[in-house]
Amino acid sequence: MSGHSKWANIKHSKGKADAAKAKVFARIAKEIMVVARNGGANPDANLRLKALITKAREQNMPNENIQRAIQRGSGQLEGVSYEELVYEGYGPAGVAILLEALTDNRNRTAGELRHIFDKYGGNLGETGSVSWVFERKGLLVIDRSEYSGSEDDMLEMALEAGAEDLRVTLEAFEIVTAPEEFEVVESSLIKAGFSFLHHEITQLPKNTVVLTDPEEIQKVERLLEMLDNCDDVQNIYDNSEVEA
Protein backbone atom coordinates (compact mmCIF):
# COMPACT_ATOMS: atom_id res chain seq x y z
CA MET A 1 0.00 0.00 0.00
CA SER A 2 1.38 3.39 -0.98
CA GLY A 3 0.02 6.86 -0.62
CA HIS A 4 1.74 10.20 -1.01
CA SER A 5 0.22 11.57 -4.21
CA LYS A 6 -3.11 13.35 -4.38
CA TRP A 7 -5.18 12.47 -7.44
CA ALA A 8 -6.26 16.07 -7.99
CA ASN A 9 -2.61 17.05 -8.41
CA ILE A 10 -1.72 14.12 -10.67
CA LYS A 11 -4.11 14.83 -13.51
CA HIS A 12 -5.01 18.28 -14.79
CA SER A 13 -8.20 17.62 -16.72
CA LYS A 14 -9.86 20.05 -19.09
CA GLY A 15 -13.17 19.14 -17.45
CA LYS A 16 -12.76 21.58 -14.57
CA ALA A 17 -15.88 22.56 -12.67
CA ASP A 18 -15.49 26.22 -13.57
CA ALA A 19 -14.92 25.63 -17.28
CA ALA A 20 -17.60 26.76 -19.69
CA LYS A 21 -20.01 23.91 -20.42
CA ALA A 22 -19.80 24.55 -24.15
CA LYS A 23 -16.03 24.02 -24.05
CA VAL A 24 -16.38 20.82 -22.01
CA PHE A 25 -19.06 19.46 -24.36
CA ALA A 26 -16.93 20.27 -27.43
CA ARG A 27 -13.93 18.46 -25.95
CA ILE A 28 -15.94 15.35 -25.10
CA ALA A 29 -17.68 15.38 -28.49
CA LYS A 30 -14.32 15.40 -30.31
CA GLU A 31 -13.16 12.41 -28.28
CA ILE A 32 -16.43 10.54 -28.92
CA MET A 33 -16.05 11.14 -32.65
CA VAL A 34 -12.55 9.67 -32.73
CA VAL A 35 -13.43 6.68 -30.57
CA ALA A 36 -16.58 5.94 -32.60
CA ARG A 37 -14.57 6.18 -35.82
CA ASN A 38 -11.89 3.80 -34.57
CA GLY A 39 -14.01 1.31 -32.64
CA GLY A 40 -17.54 1.57 -33.98
CA ALA A 41 -20.78 3.22 -32.86
CA ASN A 42 -22.01 0.41 -30.59
CA PRO A 43 -20.99 1.14 -26.97
CA ASP A 44 -21.55 -2.50 -25.99
CA ALA A 45 -18.79 -3.49 -28.39
CA ASN A 46 -16.66 -0.36 -27.91
CA LEU A 47 -15.70 0.01 -24.26
CA ARG A 48 -13.91 3.33 -24.77
CA LEU A 49 -17.08 4.75 -26.29
CA LYS A 50 -19.16 3.36 -23.42
CA ALA A 51 -16.88 5.04 -20.88
CA LEU A 52 -17.04 8.34 -22.78
CA ILE A 53 -20.84 8.28 -22.89
CA THR A 54 -20.85 7.81 -19.11
CA LYS A 55 -18.41 10.68 -18.75
CA ALA A 56 -20.55 12.90 -21.00
CA ARG A 57 -23.68 12.18 -18.98
CA GLU A 58 -21.87 12.94 -15.74
CA GLN A 59 -21.12 16.37 -17.24
CA ASN A 60 -24.85 16.73 -18.09
CA MET A 61 -24.10 16.72 -21.80
CA PRO A 62 -27.41 16.49 -23.72
CA ASN A 63 -28.10 13.09 -25.24
CA GLU A 64 -28.64 14.62 -28.68
CA ASN A 65 -25.09 16.04 -28.54
CA ILE A 66 -23.74 12.61 -27.64
CA GLN A 67 -25.62 10.89 -30.47
CA ARG A 68 -24.60 13.53 -32.99
CA ALA A 69 -20.93 13.04 -32.08
CA ILE A 70 -21.28 9.26 -32.45
CA GLN A 71 -22.94 9.66 -35.84
CA ARG A 72 -20.23 12.05 -37.07
CA GLY A 73 -17.49 9.74 -35.88
CA SER A 74 -19.04 6.65 -37.46
CA GLY A 75 -19.70 8.41 -40.79
CA GLN A 76 -23.48 8.68 -40.48
CA LEU A 77 -23.14 12.47 -40.46
CA GLU A 78 -20.48 14.66 -42.05
CA GLY A 79 -17.86 15.90 -39.62
CA VAL A 80 -14.24 16.95 -39.15
CA SER A 81 -11.67 14.16 -38.98
CA TYR A 82 -9.51 14.40 -35.85
CA GLU A 83 -6.19 12.69 -35.22
CA GLU A 84 -5.10 11.41 -31.80
CA LEU A 85 -1.61 12.60 -30.86
CA VAL A 86 0.59 12.52 -27.76
CA TYR A 87 3.05 15.30 -26.94
CA GLU A 88 5.75 15.17 -24.28
CA GLY A 89 7.82 17.80 -22.56
CA TYR A 90 9.30 19.21 -19.40
CA GLY A 91 8.18 22.16 -17.32
CA PRO A 92 9.97 24.28 -14.73
CA ALA A 93 11.83 22.29 -12.03
CA GLY A 94 12.05 19.29 -14.35
CA VAL A 95 8.36 18.39 -14.07
CA ALA A 96 7.41 15.79 -16.70
CA ILE A 97 4.31 16.66 -18.75
CA LEU A 98 2.35 14.30 -21.01
CA LEU A 99 -0.35 15.72 -23.29
CA GLU A 100 -3.12 13.90 -25.14
CA ALA A 101 -4.47 15.90 -28.06
CA LEU A 102 -7.08 15.65 -30.82
CA THR A 103 -6.36 17.80 -33.84
CA ASP A 104 -7.26 18.32 -37.48
CA ASN A 105 -3.91 20.03 -38.10
CA ARG A 106 -0.86 18.52 -36.39
CA ASN A 107 1.48 21.29 -37.57
CA ARG A 108 -0.70 23.96 -36.00
CA THR A 109 -0.99 22.05 -32.72
CA ALA A 110 2.74 21.33 -32.47
CA GLY A 111 3.52 24.99 -33.14
CA GLU A 112 1.08 26.23 -30.50
CA LEU A 113 2.35 23.80 -27.88
CA ARG A 114 6.00 24.58 -28.58
CA HIS A 115 5.26 28.29 -28.20
CA ILE A 116 3.50 27.73 -24.85
CA PHE A 117 6.31 25.56 -23.48
CA ASP A 118 8.97 28.06 -24.56
CA LYS A 119 7.10 31.08 -23.20
CA TYR A 120 6.35 29.59 -19.79
CA GLY A 121 9.65 28.00 -18.84
CA GLY A 122 9.43 24.52 -20.33
CA ASN A 123 10.41 22.71 -23.47
CA LEU A 124 8.54 20.40 -25.82
CA GLY A 125 10.44 17.12 -26.09
CA GLU A 126 10.78 14.27 -28.52
CA THR A 127 8.56 11.17 -28.52
CA GLY A 128 9.55 8.98 -25.58
CA SER A 129 11.24 11.77 -23.63
CA VAL A 130 8.80 11.60 -20.69
CA SER A 131 6.30 8.84 -21.50
CA TRP A 132 8.46 6.40 -19.52
CA VAL A 133 7.57 8.36 -16.37
CA PHE A 134 3.88 7.42 -16.66
CA GLU A 135 1.84 4.22 -16.58
CA ARG A 136 -1.65 3.79 -18.02
CA LYS A 137 -3.87 2.71 -15.13
CA GLY A 138 -7.46 2.70 -13.97
CA LEU A 139 -8.13 5.06 -11.06
CA LEU A 140 -11.16 5.03 -8.77
CA VAL A 141 -11.32 7.61 -5.99
CA ILE A 142 -13.60 7.15 -2.98
CA ASP A 143 -14.33 9.81 -0.37
CA ARG A 144 -12.94 8.54 2.95
CA SER A 145 -15.82 10.12 4.86
CA GLU A 146 -18.23 7.72 3.13
CA TYR A 147 -16.50 4.63 4.52
CA SER A 148 -16.39 3.76 8.22
CA GLY A 149 -14.10 0.72 7.90
CA SER A 150 -10.34 0.59 8.31
CA GLU A 151 -7.68 1.10 5.65
CA ASP A 152 -6.85 -2.61 5.82
CA ASP A 153 -10.50 -3.49 5.18
CA MET A 154 -10.60 -1.20 2.15
CA LEU A 155 -7.34 -2.65 0.85
CA GLU A 156 -8.67 -6.20 1.20
CA MET A 157 -11.91 -5.27 -0.55
CA ALA A 158 -10.08 -3.55 -3.40
CA LEU A 159 -7.67 -6.45 -3.94
CA GLU A 160 -10.49 -8.99 -3.89
CA ALA A 161 -12.25 -6.92 -6.58
CA GLY A 162 -9.13 -7.16 -8.76
CA ALA A 163 -7.30 -3.91 -7.97
CA GLU A 164 -3.50 -3.61 -7.99
CA ASP A 165 -2.98 -1.07 -5.23
CA LEU A 166 -4.61 1.27 -2.74
CA ARG A 167 -3.24 4.75 -2.08
CA VAL A 168 -4.53 6.49 1.04
CA THR A 169 -4.70 10.26 1.56
CA LEU A 170 -6.40 12.35 4.22
CA GLU A 171 -9.41 12.88 1.95
CA ALA A 172 -9.71 9.77 -0.18
CA PHE A 173 -8.96 6.18 -1.05
CA GLU A 174 -7.31 5.95 -4.49
CA ILE A 175 -7.80 2.50 -5.98
CA VAL A 176 -5.42 1.66 -8.84
CA THR A 177 -6.20 -1.05 -11.40
CA ALA A 178 -4.80 -2.45 -14.61
CA PRO A 179 -6.68 -0.82 -17.52
CA GLU A 180 -8.27 -4.12 -18.56
CA GLU A 181 -9.54 -4.72 -15.00
CA PHE A 182 -10.99 -1.23 -14.52
CA GLU A 183 -14.62 -2.05 -15.36
CA VAL A 184 -14.60 -5.24 -13.30
CA VAL A 185 -13.28 -3.45 -10.21
CA GLU A 186 -15.60 -0.49 -10.76
CA SER A 187 -18.64 -2.76 -11.06
CA SER A 188 -17.67 -4.72 -7.97
CA LEU A 189 -17.31 -1.59 -5.85
CA ILE A 190 -20.58 -0.13 -7.12
CA LYS A 191 -22.33 -3.36 -6.12
CA ALA A 192 -20.73 -2.98 -2.68
CA GLY A 193 -22.43 0.41 -2.37
CA PHE A 194 -19.59 2.80 -3.23
CA SER A 195 -19.74 5.91 -5.37
CA PHE A 196 -16.72 7.72 -6.78
CA LEU A 197 -15.30 11.22 -6.63
CA HIS A 198 -13.36 10.37 -9.77
CA HIS A 199 -13.16 7.28 -11.97
CA GLU A 200 -11.38 6.79 -15.27
CA ILE A 201 -8.46 5.22 -17.07
CA THR A 202 -5.62 7.69 -16.80
CA GLN A 203 -1.84 8.13 -16.75
CA LEU A 204 -0.22 7.85 -13.31
CA PRO A 205 3.40 8.89 -12.67
CA LYS A 206 5.87 6.26 -11.46
CA ASN A 207 7.72 8.99 -9.57
CA THR A 208 7.00 12.59 -8.64
CA VAL A 209 8.86 15.90 -8.47
CA VAL A 210 8.15 17.51 -5.09
CA LEU A 211 7.76 21.29 -5.36
CA THR A 212 8.45 23.40 -2.27
CA ASP A 213 9.43 26.79 -3.69
CA PRO A 214 6.37 29.08 -4.17
CA GLU A 215 7.87 30.64 -7.29
CA GLU A 216 8.45 27.24 -8.92
CA ILE A 217 4.95 26.12 -7.97
CA GLN A 218 3.50 29.24 -9.59
CA LYS A 219 5.53 28.72 -12.77
CA VAL A 220 4.43 25.09 -13.13
CA GLU A 221 0.80 25.97 -12.49
CA ARG A 222 0.94 28.79 -15.04
CA LEU A 223 2.38 26.51 -17.73
CA LEU A 224 -0.25 23.84 -17.05
CA GLU A 225 -2.98 26.48 -17.16
CA MET A 226 -1.85 27.78 -20.55
CA LEU A 227 -1.58 24.25 -21.97
CA ASP A 228 -5.08 23.62 -20.63
CA ASN A 229 -6.34 26.60 -22.62
CA CYS A 230 -5.18 25.07 -25.92
CA ASP A 231 -8.31 23.83 -27.70
CA ASP A 232 -6.56 20.80 -29.19
CA VAL A 233 -5.38 19.46 -25.82
CA GLN A 234 -7.70 16.88 -24.29
CA ASN A 235 -5.81 15.78 -21.18
CA ILE A 236 -2.71 16.90 -19.34
CA TYR A 237 -0.73 14.65 -17.00
CA ASP A 238 2.23 15.73 -14.92
CA ASN A 239 4.34 14.34 -12.10
CA SER A 240 4.50 17.40 -9.88
CA GLU A 241 3.61 17.14 -6.21
CA VAL A 242 3.17 20.21 -4.03
CA GLU A 243 4.50 19.66 -0.53
CA ALA A 244 1.73 20.22 2.01
Image (cartoon, grey):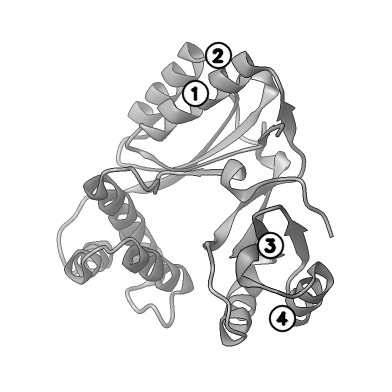
Badge nearest the viewer, 4 or 2: 4
Q: How many marks?
A: 4
* Residue under pointer 1: 223
Q: Earlier in the sequence, mark 1 or mark 4?
A: 4
Of 2 and 149, which appears nearest the observer? 149
Q: Which residue is drawn at 72% across and 41% down?
A: 132
Q: Is mark 2 on a helix, strand or loop?
A: loop
Q: In the displayed structure, would residue 221 be above or below residue 195? A: above
Spot occupied by residue 17 in the image (x, y as percentages of width and height) = 37, 48
Residue 93 locus on image (x, y percent)? 68, 19
Q: Sequence-wise, which precedes: disc 2 or disc 1?
A: 2
How far across and how far down the image is residue 137, in percent?
65, 59
Task: Quarter of the image for the C terminus: give it.
Answer: top right
Residue 238 lies in quadrant: top right
Inspect the image, locate mark 2, and give the three-letter code of the amino acid beneath it.
Gly
Q: Which of 227 and 89 is in front in this view?
A: 227
Of marks 4 and 2, which one's residue comes earlier in the chain?
A: 2
Which residue is denoted by mark 3 in the rendering?
A: 173
Q: Nearer the viewer, mark 2 or mark 3?
A: 3
Type of amino acid at the residue the image marks with label 1: Leu
Q: How far apart are marks 1 and 4 (CA)?
A: 38 Å
Task: Give the left or right position of residue 103, taking residue 113 as reference.
Answer: left
Cα gap from disc 3 to disc 4, whole angstroms = 15 Å
Q: Earlier in the sequence, mark 2 or mark 3?
A: 2
* Circle 4 Cα neighbour tier, 10 Å, few/some/many (<14 / 14–19 / ≥20): some
Residue designated by label 4: 161
Mark 3 residue type: Phe
Please give left or right for residue 204 compared with residue 44 in the image: right
Q: Which of marks 3 and 1 is in front?
A: 3
- Disc 2 marks which residue? 121
- Labelled disc at residue 101: none
Q: Distance between the residues labelled 2 and 3?
A: 34 Å
